[in-house]
Protein backbone atom coordinates (compact mmCIF):
# COMPACT_ATOMS: atom_id res chain seq x y z
CA UNK A 1 0.00 0.00 0.00
CA UNK A 2 1.51 3.32 -1.08
CA UNK A 3 1.07 6.70 0.67
CA UNK A 4 -0.24 8.26 -2.56
CA UNK A 5 -1.51 7.13 -5.92
CA UNK A 6 0.37 9.89 -7.73
CA UNK A 7 3.22 11.96 -6.28
CA UNK A 8 4.21 15.08 -8.25
CA UNK A 9 7.63 16.73 -7.93
CA UNK A 10 7.11 20.44 -8.63
CA UNK A 11 4.08 22.75 -8.58
CA UNK A 12 4.61 24.68 -11.82
CA UNK A 13 2.03 24.56 -14.64
CA UNK A 14 2.71 20.87 -15.46
CA UNK A 15 2.90 19.62 -11.89
CA UNK A 16 -0.10 21.60 -10.71
CA UNK A 17 -2.36 20.30 -13.50
CA UNK A 18 -1.10 16.72 -13.04
CA UNK A 19 -1.96 16.82 -9.31
CA UNK A 20 -5.39 18.39 -9.84
CA UNK A 21 -6.28 15.98 -12.67
CA UNK A 22 -5.32 13.07 -10.37
CA UNK A 23 -7.54 14.43 -7.61
CA UNK A 24 -10.45 14.97 -10.02
CA UNK A 25 -10.20 11.28 -10.94
CA UNK A 26 -10.70 10.39 -7.26
CA UNK A 27 -7.09 9.35 -6.58
CA UNK A 28 -4.78 10.44 -3.76
CA UNK A 29 -2.38 13.11 -4.98
CA UNK A 30 0.51 14.99 -3.39
CA UNK A 31 2.89 17.72 -4.55
CA UNK A 32 6.46 18.24 -3.33
CA UNK A 33 7.51 21.90 -3.57
CA UNK A 34 9.77 24.38 -1.76
CA UNK A 35 7.85 26.70 0.58
CA UNK A 36 8.85 29.84 -1.33
CA UNK A 37 8.26 28.40 -4.81
CA UNK A 38 4.58 27.43 -4.89
CA UNK A 39 3.55 27.79 -8.52
CA UNK A 40 7.08 26.98 -9.65
CA UNK A 41 9.44 29.05 -11.77
CA UNK A 42 6.51 30.05 -14.01
CA UNK A 43 4.83 32.15 -11.32
CA UNK A 44 7.83 33.17 -9.21
CA UNK A 45 10.69 34.04 -11.57
CA UNK A 46 9.66 33.24 -15.16
CA UNK A 47 6.50 33.64 -17.19
CA UNK A 48 4.27 35.61 -14.82
CA UNK A 49 6.81 38.22 -13.62
CA UNK A 50 8.23 38.76 -17.12
CA UNK A 51 4.80 39.22 -18.71
CA UNK A 52 3.70 41.49 -15.85
CA UNK A 53 6.87 43.57 -16.28
CA UNK A 54 6.03 43.86 -19.99
CA UNK A 55 2.53 45.11 -19.17
CA UNK A 56 3.94 47.63 -16.67
CA UNK A 57 6.51 48.83 -19.23
CA UNK A 58 3.83 49.31 -21.90
CA UNK A 59 1.59 51.24 -19.51
CA UNK A 60 4.17 53.43 -17.75
CA UNK A 61 6.07 54.38 -20.93
CA UNK A 62 2.86 55.13 -22.83
CA UNK A 63 4.56 53.46 -25.80
CA UNK A 64 1.38 52.09 -27.38
CA UNK A 65 -0.34 55.49 -27.22
CA UNK A 66 2.36 57.59 -28.89
CA UNK A 67 0.93 57.35 -32.39
CA UNK A 68 -2.05 59.35 -31.16
CA UNK A 69 -0.50 61.63 -28.52
CA UNK A 70 2.99 62.19 -29.98
CA UNK A 71 6.43 60.66 -29.46
CA UNK A 72 7.00 62.66 -26.26
CA UNK A 73 3.96 61.10 -24.55
CA UNK A 74 4.78 59.44 -21.20
CA UNK A 75 2.61 58.22 -18.34
CA UNK A 76 5.58 58.49 -15.95
CA UNK A 77 8.80 60.32 -16.73
CA UNK A 78 11.27 58.57 -14.42
CA UNK A 79 10.35 54.88 -14.27
CA UNK A 80 12.11 52.93 -11.51
CA UNK A 81 12.58 49.21 -10.91
CA UNK A 82 10.33 49.65 -7.85
CA UNK A 83 7.52 50.83 -10.16
CA UNK A 84 7.89 47.71 -12.28
CA UNK A 85 8.36 45.21 -9.46
CA UNK A 86 5.47 46.49 -7.33
CA UNK A 87 3.06 45.35 -10.04
CA UNK A 88 4.97 42.08 -10.61
CA UNK A 89 5.02 41.25 -6.89
CA UNK A 90 1.31 41.97 -6.57
CA UNK A 91 0.48 39.58 -9.43
CA UNK A 92 2.89 36.90 -8.15
CA UNK A 93 1.24 37.02 -4.70
CA UNK A 94 -2.22 36.68 -6.20
CA UNK A 95 -1.20 33.79 -8.47
CA UNK A 96 0.48 31.89 -5.61
CA UNK A 97 -2.79 32.22 -3.66
CA UNK A 98 -4.75 30.88 -6.63
CA UNK A 99 -2.47 27.81 -6.92
CA UNK A 100 -2.56 27.13 -3.15
CA UNK A 101 -6.35 27.43 -3.16
CA UNK A 102 -6.78 25.11 -6.17
CA UNK A 103 -4.55 22.42 -4.63
CA UNK A 104 -6.20 22.78 -1.23
CA UNK A 105 -9.80 22.59 -2.39
CA UNK A 106 -8.99 19.53 -4.51
CA UNK A 107 -7.46 17.92 -1.39
CA UNK A 108 -4.00 17.63 -2.89
CA UNK A 109 -1.45 17.14 -0.10
CA UNK A 110 1.33 19.75 -0.08
CA UNK A 111 4.71 18.39 1.05
CA UNK A 112 7.05 21.38 1.57
CA UNK A 113 10.68 20.80 0.65
CA UNK A 114 12.97 19.31 -2.00
CA UNK A 115 12.35 15.79 -3.27
CA UNK A 116 14.97 13.17 -4.17
CA UNK A 117 14.51 9.53 -5.15
CA UNK A 118 15.29 6.75 -2.66
CA UNK A 119 14.07 4.09 -5.08
CA UNK A 120 11.62 3.94 -7.98
CA UNK A 121 8.55 4.22 -5.70
CA UNK A 122 10.00 6.24 -2.80
CA UNK A 123 10.92 9.92 -2.54
CA UNK A 124 12.75 11.60 0.34
CA UNK A 125 11.53 15.12 1.11
CA UNK A 126 13.99 17.51 2.80
CA UNK A 127 12.01 20.42 4.23
CA UNK A 128 14.94 22.83 4.64
CA UNK A 129 15.00 22.62 8.45
CA UNK A 130 16.96 19.39 8.54
CA UNK A 131 13.88 17.17 8.75
CA UNK A 132 13.58 14.34 6.23
CA UNK A 133 10.40 12.48 5.36
CA UNK A 134 10.05 9.47 3.09
CA UNK A 135 6.86 9.09 1.04
CA UNK A 136 5.85 6.34 -1.35
CA UNK A 137 3.67 6.47 -4.45
CA UNK A 138 2.35 4.10 -7.07
CA UNK A 139 3.07 6.61 -9.84
CA UNK A 140 5.46 9.59 -9.79
CA UNK A 141 5.45 12.67 -12.05
CA UNK A 142 8.65 14.71 -12.44
CA UNK A 143 7.71 18.35 -13.10
CA UNK A 144 10.74 20.15 -11.67
CA UNK A 145 11.14 22.63 -14.53
CA UNK A 146 14.31 24.46 -15.52
CA UNK A 147 16.66 27.23 -14.45
CA UNK A 148 18.76 29.59 -16.61
CA UNK A 149 21.81 27.81 -18.03
CA UNK A 150 25.04 29.43 -16.84
CA UNK A 151 28.14 28.95 -19.03
CA UNK A 152 31.12 27.88 -16.88
CA UNK A 153 33.39 30.54 -18.37
CA UNK A 154 31.09 33.41 -17.29
CA UNK A 155 31.55 35.04 -13.87
CA UNK A 156 27.98 35.89 -12.80
CA UNK A 157 27.82 38.44 -9.97
CA UNK A 158 24.06 39.15 -9.88
CA UNK A 159 24.45 42.89 -10.53
CA UNK A 160 26.68 43.53 -13.55
CA UNK A 161 26.68 40.06 -15.16
CA UNK A 162 23.29 38.40 -14.70
CA UNK A 163 20.98 35.71 -16.08
CA UNK A 164 17.25 36.23 -16.76
CA UNK A 165 16.38 35.55 -13.07
CA UNK A 166 18.65 38.46 -12.13
CA UNK A 167 16.35 40.93 -13.93
CA UNK A 168 14.01 40.80 -10.92
CA UNK A 169 16.89 41.76 -8.61
CA UNK A 170 18.15 44.83 -10.48
CA UNK A 171 18.32 47.93 -8.29
CA UNK A 172 17.62 50.38 -11.11
CA UNK A 173 16.87 50.51 -14.82
CA UNK A 174 20.29 50.45 -16.52
CA UNK A 175 21.17 53.02 -19.18
CA UNK A 176 22.75 50.33 -21.35
CA UNK A 177 22.52 46.54 -21.55
CA UNK A 178 24.06 43.73 -23.58
CA UNK A 179 21.79 40.71 -24.12
CA UNK A 180 23.79 37.60 -25.04
CA UNK A 181 21.50 35.24 -26.95
CA UNK A 182 18.59 36.19 -29.23
CA UNK A 183 16.24 33.42 -28.15
CA UNK A 184 12.70 34.03 -26.92
CA UNK A 185 13.66 35.13 -23.38
CA UNK A 186 16.56 37.30 -24.57
CA UNK A 187 14.48 39.14 -27.16
CA UNK A 188 11.52 39.60 -24.79
CA UNK A 189 13.74 41.33 -22.20
CA UNK A 190 15.66 43.25 -24.90
CA UNK A 191 12.39 44.77 -26.16
CA UNK A 192 11.20 45.63 -22.63
CA UNK A 193 14.39 47.45 -21.63
CA UNK A 194 14.60 49.19 -25.02
CA UNK A 195 11.06 50.50 -24.43
CA UNK A 196 12.27 51.88 -21.08
CA UNK A 197 14.93 53.90 -22.91
CA UNK A 198 17.82 51.55 -22.16
CA UNK A 199 20.36 51.26 -25.00
CA UNK A 200 20.31 47.53 -25.79
CA UNK A 201 22.82 45.51 -27.84
CA UNK A 202 21.83 41.94 -28.75
CA UNK A 203 24.68 39.52 -29.48
CA UNK A 204 23.79 36.28 -31.28
CA UNK A 205 26.17 33.69 -32.74
CA UNK A 206 23.67 32.54 -35.37
CA UNK A 207 22.72 34.33 -38.61
CA UNK A 208 19.24 35.28 -37.44
CA UNK A 209 16.96 35.28 -34.42
CA UNK A 210 13.78 33.29 -33.75
CA UNK A 211 14.46 31.07 -36.78
CA UNK A 212 11.33 28.99 -36.09
CA UNK A 213 9.12 32.04 -36.77
CA UNK A 214 7.86 33.48 -40.05
CA UNK A 215 10.75 35.42 -41.61
CA UNK A 216 8.60 38.48 -42.46
CA UNK A 217 7.35 38.69 -38.89
CA UNK A 218 10.91 38.50 -37.52
CA UNK A 219 12.03 41.22 -39.96
CA UNK A 220 9.13 43.43 -38.79
CA UNK A 221 10.11 42.85 -35.16
CA UNK A 222 13.74 43.72 -35.91
CA UNK A 223 12.61 46.95 -37.59
CA UNK A 224 10.61 47.96 -34.50
CA UNK A 225 13.41 47.06 -32.10
CA UNK A 226 15.91 49.05 -34.17
CA UNK A 227 13.44 51.94 -33.96
CA UNK A 228 13.79 51.61 -30.16
CA UNK A 229 17.60 51.92 -30.62
CA UNK A 230 18.39 48.19 -30.27
CA UNK A 231 21.66 47.20 -31.97
CA UNK A 232 21.97 43.65 -33.33
CA UNK A 233 25.30 41.83 -33.58
CA UNK A 234 24.65 38.59 -35.47
CA UNK A 235 27.39 35.99 -36.15
CA UNK A 236 29.21 37.33 -33.09
CA UNK A 237 30.28 35.44 -29.95
CA UNK A 238 31.22 36.93 -26.58
CA UNK A 239 34.75 35.74 -25.75
CA UNK A 240 35.03 37.48 -22.37
CA UNK A 241 33.34 40.01 -20.09
CA UNK A 242 35.54 42.42 -18.13
CA UNK A 243 33.87 44.04 -15.13
CA UNK A 244 34.50 47.74 -14.44
CA UNK A 245 33.34 49.97 -11.53
CA UNK A 246 30.60 51.47 -13.73
CA UNK A 247 29.62 48.33 -15.64
CA UNK A 248 31.34 45.90 -17.98
CA UNK A 249 33.01 45.57 -21.37
CA UNK A 250 32.04 42.58 -23.50
CA UNK A 251 34.85 41.47 -25.79
CA UNK A 252 33.77 39.72 -28.98
CA UNK A 253 35.75 36.94 -30.64
CA UNK A 254 35.96 39.31 -33.62
CA UNK A 255 37.81 41.82 -31.42
CA UNK A 256 34.92 44.26 -30.95
CA UNK A 257 34.56 45.77 -27.46
CA UNK A 258 31.05 46.73 -26.34
CA UNK A 259 30.50 48.66 -23.07
CA UNK A 260 27.32 48.38 -20.98
CA UNK A 261 26.11 48.78 -17.40
CA UNK A 262 24.62 45.27 -17.38
CA UNK A 263 25.32 42.08 -19.35
CA UNK A 264 22.44 39.59 -19.38
CA UNK A 265 23.10 36.04 -20.54
CA UNK A 266 20.17 34.23 -22.11
CA UNK A 267 21.93 30.97 -22.96
CA UNK A 268 18.97 28.59 -22.83
CA UNK A 269 17.76 26.72 -19.77
CA UNK A 270 18.94 23.72 -17.74
CA UNK A 271 16.60 21.02 -16.43
CA UNK A 272 16.43 20.99 -12.61
CA UNK A 273 17.24 17.30 -12.17
CA UNK A 274 20.72 17.39 -10.58
CA UNK A 275 19.41 17.01 -7.01
CA UNK A 276 16.74 14.37 -7.80
CA UNK A 277 19.13 11.37 -7.56
CA UNK A 278 17.57 9.99 -10.75
CA UNK A 279 19.92 7.00 -10.78
CA UNK A 280 18.24 5.65 -7.62
CA UNK A 281 15.04 5.29 -9.68
CA UNK A 282 16.83 3.85 -12.70
CA UNK A 283 16.63 7.13 -14.65
CA UNK A 284 19.09 9.48 -16.31
CA UNK A 285 19.13 12.98 -17.81
CA UNK A 286 20.99 14.46 -20.80
CA UNK A 287 23.67 17.13 -20.49
CA UNK A 288 20.97 19.85 -20.35
CA UNK A 289 19.26 18.05 -17.46
CA UNK A 290 16.33 16.92 -19.60
CA UNK A 291 14.47 13.61 -19.17
CA UNK A 292 13.37 11.57 -22.19
CA UNK A 293 9.70 10.49 -22.40
CA UNK A 294 7.33 8.70 -24.80
CA UNK A 295 4.08 10.06 -26.28
CA UNK A 296 2.28 9.47 -22.95
CA UNK A 297 5.08 11.22 -21.00
CA UNK A 298 6.39 7.97 -19.50
CA UNK A 299 10.12 7.82 -18.79
CA UNK A 300 12.21 4.67 -19.27
CA UNK A 301 10.71 3.53 -15.94
CA UNK A 302 7.03 3.09 -16.99
CA UNK A 303 5.38 4.22 -13.73
CA UNK A 304 7.49 7.41 -13.57
CA UNK A 305 6.35 10.28 -15.82
CA UNK A 306 7.94 13.64 -16.68
CA UNK A 307 6.23 16.78 -17.99
CA UNK A 308 6.92 20.45 -18.70
CA UNK A 309 10.20 22.20 -19.37
CA UNK A 310 12.21 19.32 -17.87
CA UNK A 311 11.44 17.21 -20.98
CA UNK A 312 12.53 19.95 -23.40
CA UNK A 313 10.78 21.48 -26.44
CA UNK A 314 8.41 23.28 -26.62
CA UNK A 315 8.93 24.23 -22.94
CA UNK A 316 5.88 26.51 -22.77
CA UNK A 317 3.60 26.95 -19.76
CA UNK A 318 0.56 26.25 -21.94
CA UNK A 319 1.84 22.94 -23.32
CA UNK A 320 3.20 21.94 -19.89
CA UNK A 321 -0.29 22.23 -18.41
CA UNK A 322 -1.74 19.88 -21.00
CA UNK A 323 1.19 17.47 -20.65
CA UNK A 324 0.54 17.33 -16.89
CA UNK A 325 -3.15 16.61 -17.38
CA UNK A 326 -2.52 13.90 -19.98
CA UNK A 327 0.22 12.25 -17.90
CA UNK A 328 -2.05 12.12 -14.85
CA UNK A 329 -4.91 10.58 -16.86
CA UNK A 330 -2.58 7.95 -18.31
CA UNK A 331 -1.09 7.23 -14.86
CA UNK A 332 -4.60 6.72 -13.48
CA UNK A 333 -5.51 4.26 -16.26
CA UNK A 334 -7.74 6.64 -18.21
CA UNK A 335 -7.69 6.49 -22.01
CA UNK A 336 -5.93 9.53 -23.46
CA UNK A 337 -5.13 10.93 -26.87
CA UNK A 338 -1.57 11.97 -27.65
CA UNK A 339 -0.90 15.72 -27.35
CA UNK A 340 -1.97 17.50 -30.54
CA UNK A 341 0.87 18.68 -32.74
CA UNK A 342 -1.14 21.84 -33.43
CA UNK A 343 0.05 24.12 -30.61
CA UNK A 344 0.13 27.94 -30.60
CA UNK A 345 3.41 29.73 -29.91
CA UNK A 346 3.31 33.13 -28.19
CA UNK A 347 6.32 35.45 -27.89
CA UNK A 348 5.78 38.46 -25.63
CA UNK A 349 8.11 40.92 -27.31
CA UNK A 350 7.08 44.52 -27.91
CA UNK A 351 5.19 44.20 -30.29
CA UNK A 352 4.12 40.61 -29.63
CA UNK A 353 4.23 37.63 -32.00
CA UNK A 354 2.06 34.54 -32.15
CA UNK A 355 1.60 31.77 -34.67
CA UNK A 356 0.23 28.29 -35.19
CA UNK A 357 0.85 25.76 -37.93
CA UNK A 358 3.44 25.95 -40.68
CA UNK A 359 5.62 28.82 -41.88
CA UNK A 360 6.03 29.78 -45.54
CA UNK A 361 9.57 28.34 -45.56
CA UNK A 362 8.38 24.99 -44.17
CA UNK A 363 5.59 24.69 -46.74
CA UNK A 364 7.91 25.65 -49.60
CA UNK A 365 10.52 23.10 -48.46
CA UNK A 366 7.79 20.42 -48.29
CA UNK A 367 6.53 21.47 -51.75
CA UNK A 368 3.02 22.13 -50.51
CA UNK A 369 1.29 24.78 -52.71
CA UNK A 370 -0.24 27.60 -50.67
CA UNK A 371 -1.60 31.11 -51.01
CA UNK A 372 -1.07 33.98 -48.58
CA UNK A 373 -3.84 36.21 -47.26
CA UNK A 374 -2.76 39.38 -45.43
CA UNK A 375 -4.61 41.85 -43.24
CA UNK A 376 -2.91 45.01 -41.93
CA UNK A 377 -4.09 46.59 -38.70
CA UNK A 378 -3.82 50.07 -40.24
CA UNK A 379 -6.66 49.12 -42.62
CA UNK A 380 -8.91 48.09 -39.71
CA UNK A 381 -10.95 50.65 -37.80
CA UNK A 382 -9.88 48.99 -34.53
CA UNK A 383 -6.23 49.34 -35.51
CA UNK A 384 -6.70 53.09 -35.93
CA UNK A 385 -8.63 53.38 -32.66
CA UNK A 386 -5.87 51.69 -30.60
CA UNK A 387 -3.04 53.38 -32.51
CA UNK A 388 -1.47 50.23 -33.98
CA UNK A 389 -0.54 50.93 -37.60
CA UNK A 390 2.11 48.21 -37.92
CA UNK A 391 0.22 45.04 -36.89
CA UNK A 392 -0.38 42.32 -39.45
CA UNK A 393 -2.18 38.97 -39.64
CA UNK A 394 -1.18 36.44 -42.27
CA UNK A 395 -3.10 33.31 -43.30
CA UNK A 396 -1.43 30.48 -45.22
CA UNK A 397 -4.12 28.67 -47.22
CA UNK A 398 -3.84 25.36 -49.11
CA UNK A 399 -4.44 25.77 -52.85
CA UNK A 400 -5.67 22.16 -53.01
CA UNK A 401 -8.47 22.08 -50.42
CA UNK A 402 -8.55 25.64 -48.97
CA UNK A 403 -7.62 24.39 -45.49
CA UNK A 404 -5.66 26.78 -43.26
CA UNK A 405 -2.05 25.65 -42.98
CA UNK A 406 -0.73 28.43 -40.76
CA UNK A 407 -1.65 31.66 -38.98
CA UNK A 408 1.01 34.29 -38.18
CA UNK A 409 0.19 37.43 -36.20
CA UNK A 410 2.41 40.41 -35.32
CA UNK A 411 1.10 43.31 -33.27
CA UNK A 412 -1.30 44.18 -30.44
CA UNK A 413 -3.21 41.19 -29.08
CA UNK A 414 -1.38 38.66 -31.30
CA UNK A 415 -1.31 35.99 -28.56
CA UNK A 416 -5.09 36.26 -28.15
CA UNK A 417 -5.98 36.55 -31.85
CA UNK A 418 -4.14 33.37 -32.86
CA UNK A 419 -6.71 31.21 -31.07
CA UNK A 420 -9.42 32.01 -33.64
CA UNK A 421 -7.24 30.44 -36.31
CA UNK A 422 -6.39 27.58 -33.95
CA UNK A 423 -10.10 26.78 -33.47
CA UNK A 424 -10.79 26.77 -37.23
CA UNK A 425 -7.71 24.63 -37.94
CA UNK A 426 -8.44 22.25 -35.07
CA UNK A 427 -11.98 21.65 -36.35
CA UNK A 428 -10.78 21.03 -39.91
CA UNK A 429 -12.34 24.25 -41.20
CA UNK A 430 -11.41 26.01 -44.43
CA UNK A 431 -10.81 29.59 -45.43
CA UNK A 432 -14.43 29.66 -46.69
CA UNK A 433 -15.64 29.66 -43.07
CA UNK A 434 -13.69 32.86 -42.37
CA UNK A 435 -14.90 34.46 -45.61
CA UNK A 436 -18.55 33.81 -44.65
CA UNK A 437 -18.23 34.58 -40.90
CA UNK A 438 -19.41 37.89 -39.45
CA UNK A 439 -17.01 39.43 -36.92
CA UNK A 440 -17.83 42.20 -34.46
CA UNK A 441 -16.90 45.65 -35.78
CA UNK A 442 -14.61 47.37 -34.98
CA UNK A 443 -12.32 44.56 -33.73
CA UNK A 444 -8.89 43.17 -34.51
CA UNK A 445 -10.57 39.76 -35.01
CA UNK A 446 -12.01 41.20 -38.21
CA UNK A 447 -8.49 40.82 -39.64
CA UNK A 448 -9.30 37.13 -40.20
CA UNK A 449 -12.07 38.02 -42.65
CA UNK A 450 -9.90 40.57 -44.47
CA UNK A 451 -7.00 38.09 -44.77
CA UNK A 452 -9.36 35.29 -45.83
CA UNK A 453 -10.86 37.45 -48.60
CA UNK A 454 -7.36 38.41 -49.72
CA UNK A 455 -6.34 34.74 -50.00
CA UNK A 456 -9.57 33.77 -51.78
CA UNK A 457 -9.21 36.57 -54.33
CA UNK A 458 -5.71 35.32 -55.17
CA UNK A 459 -6.92 31.71 -55.48
CA UNK A 460 -9.81 32.82 -57.75
CA UNK A 461 -7.40 34.75 -59.94
CA UNK A 462 -5.46 31.53 -60.63
CA UNK A 463 -8.71 29.56 -61.19
CA UNK A 464 -9.91 32.15 -63.76
CA UNK A 465 -6.65 31.86 -65.70
CA UNK A 466 -6.65 28.03 -65.78
Image (cartoon, grey):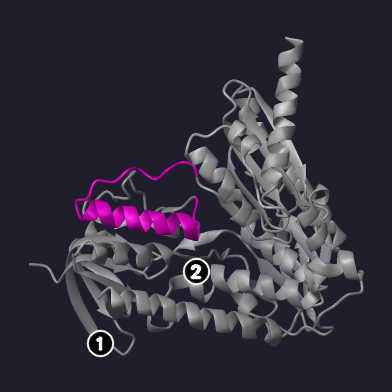
What residue is at 36 percent from the left and 63 percent from the top? 17
Disc 2 packing (10 Å; few <14; some 14–19; many ≥20): many
Q: Which label lies toward us, 1 or 2?
A: 2
Which residue appears farthest toward the top when viewing the image? 466
The tag earlier along the polypeptide, 1 or 2, is 2
Give the quadrant of residue 436. Answer: top right
Residue 85 placed where, x, y %? 64, 83
Real-space Cα distance between discs 1 and 2?
27 Å
Name the residue nearer the viewer: 112 or 397.
Answer: 397
Using the rendered image of the protein, determine whether residue 230 is visible from the camera's viewpoint. yes
Question: Which residues lie in the magenta part?
Answer: 314-342
76 versus 457 height, above or below: below
Residue 408 placed where, x, y %? 66, 44
Residue under circle 2?
Answer: 42
What residue is at 68 percent from the left and 87 percent from the top? 82
Residue 19 in the figure: left or right of residue 356: left
Residue 405 placed where, x, y %? 58, 33
Name the residue nearer the viewer: 444 or 369.
Answer: 444
Residue 141 in the figure: left or right of residue 52: left
Residue under circle 1?
Answer: 131
Amino acid sequence: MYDFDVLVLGSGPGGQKAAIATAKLGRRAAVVERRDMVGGVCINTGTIPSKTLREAVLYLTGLSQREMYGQSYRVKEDITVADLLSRANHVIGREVDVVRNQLSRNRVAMLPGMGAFVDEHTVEVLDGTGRETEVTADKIVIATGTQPARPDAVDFDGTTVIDSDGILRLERVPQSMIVVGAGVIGIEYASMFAALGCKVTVVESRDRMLDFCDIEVVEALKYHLRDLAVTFRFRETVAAVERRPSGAIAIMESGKRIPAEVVMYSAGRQGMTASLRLEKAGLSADRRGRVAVDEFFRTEVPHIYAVGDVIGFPALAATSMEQGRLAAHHACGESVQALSSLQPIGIYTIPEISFIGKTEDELTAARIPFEVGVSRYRELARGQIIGDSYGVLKLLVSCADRSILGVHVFGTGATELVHIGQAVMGCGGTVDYLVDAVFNYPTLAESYKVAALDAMNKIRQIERMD
